[in-house]
């Protein structure tokens, strides 16, 4: 069983690296996501402009904080699902396999945060679907402006979670602003996230980790972890 999975992982990675479709698909998904995020923000601004007399700063702040917490939770749940998914033979199998490489990645290629925002959005299939439905709803029905703001903010924060995770691994240790934001738990703190790489089936959240205690309980209920599962497939692949 384990040998089969190692083999399936290798085949999936070969497809990911060599197949034109899998090579370009991430760029297409990222472009859809960024395009839909821009359209959803424009629609939101129009909605807020029409209700400018009743939209308040406190309401906006509360909704944004709530969206940040929700986006952290969603990032944790999706990450948990992906880490424990070994369905390499499915159509998205090559993406699942490539995703599993992150546990053995102490540092990423240094890039501009905006480039990270774009490229890493390319593996967020769920987000592309979410944003298409959101934009459809914005055109189709009159969304209550605070609900509209909540849904748009979740869309943006979900991509930003990837940048927060990237900074966890790559940020210059002398960058005082990022360090402060990480210590304040606005960005994902390094010491907190380290647990995900060292321990098993834990600390999945990507944005700031504030919902991890809750995600950890869910993970314990549904999964046995990645150390004796997907991580073994990655190690065998890397040892080749
Ligand atoms: Zn992981
Ligand atoms: Zn990491």
Image (spheres, rainbow, N blue to C red):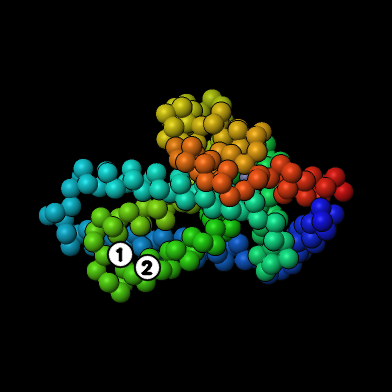
Q: Position of residue 44 (x, y in %)?
A: 29, 60
Question: Could you tell me which quadrant the N terminus lies in?
Answer: bottom right
Q: Position of residue 104 (x, y in %)?
A: 71, 41
* Mark 1 crowd level (few <14, some 14–19, many ≥20, 10 Å Cα): some
Residue 53: in sight, yes or no? yes
Name the residue nearer the viewer: 19 or 62: 62
Q: Is residue 213 left or right of residue 150?
A: right
Residue found at x 48% / y 37%: 213
**What is the secondary structure assignment of the residue under circle 1?**
helix
**What is the secondary structure assignment of the residue under circle 2?**
helix
Identify the residue at the far left of this view: 53
Tell me the quarter of the picture where residue 150 sits: bottom left
Residue found at x 65% / y 38%: 200
The correct choice, above or below, for 165 with respect to 125 in the image is above
Residue hosting label 1: 43
Name the residue nearer the viewer: 221 or 179: 221
CB-based contact (under 8 Å), mark 1 and mark 2: yes
Q: CA distance from mark 1 to mark 2?
A: 8 Å
Residue hosting label 2: 135
The correct choice, above or below, for 86 with respect to 110 in the image is below
Q: Is residue 233 left or right of residue 240?
A: left
């Amino acid at each position: 069983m384990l040998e089969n999975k190692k083999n399936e992982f290798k085949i999936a990675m070969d497809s990911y690296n060599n197949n034109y479709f899998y090579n370009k698909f991430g760029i297409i998904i990222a472009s859809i996501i960024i395009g839909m995020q821009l359209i959803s923000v424009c629609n939101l601004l129009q909605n807020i402009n029409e209700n400018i007399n009743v939209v308040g700063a406190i309401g906006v702040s509360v909704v944004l904080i709530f969206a940040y917490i929700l986006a952290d939770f969603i990032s944790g749940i999706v990450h948990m699902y992906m880490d424990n998914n070994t369905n390499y033979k499915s159509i998205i199998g090559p993406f699942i396999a490539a995703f599993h490489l992150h546990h053995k990645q102490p540092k990423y290629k240094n890039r501009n945060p905006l480039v990270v925002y774009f490229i890493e959005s390319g593996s967020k299939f769920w987000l592309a679907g979410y944003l298409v439905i959101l934009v459809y709803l914005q055109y189709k029905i009159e969304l209550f402006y605070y609900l509209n703001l909540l849904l748009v903010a979740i869309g943006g924060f979900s991509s930003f979670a990837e940048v927060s995770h990237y900074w966890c691994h790559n940020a210059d240790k002398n960058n005082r602003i990022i360090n402060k934001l990480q210590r304040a738990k606005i960005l994902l703190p390094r010491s907190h996230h380290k647990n995900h790489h060292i321990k098993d089936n834990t600390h999945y959240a990507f944005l700031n980790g504030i919902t991890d205690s809750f995600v950890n309980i869910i993970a314990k209920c549904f999964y046995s972890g990645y150390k004796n599962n997907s991580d073994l497939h990655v190690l065998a692949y890397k040892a080749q």
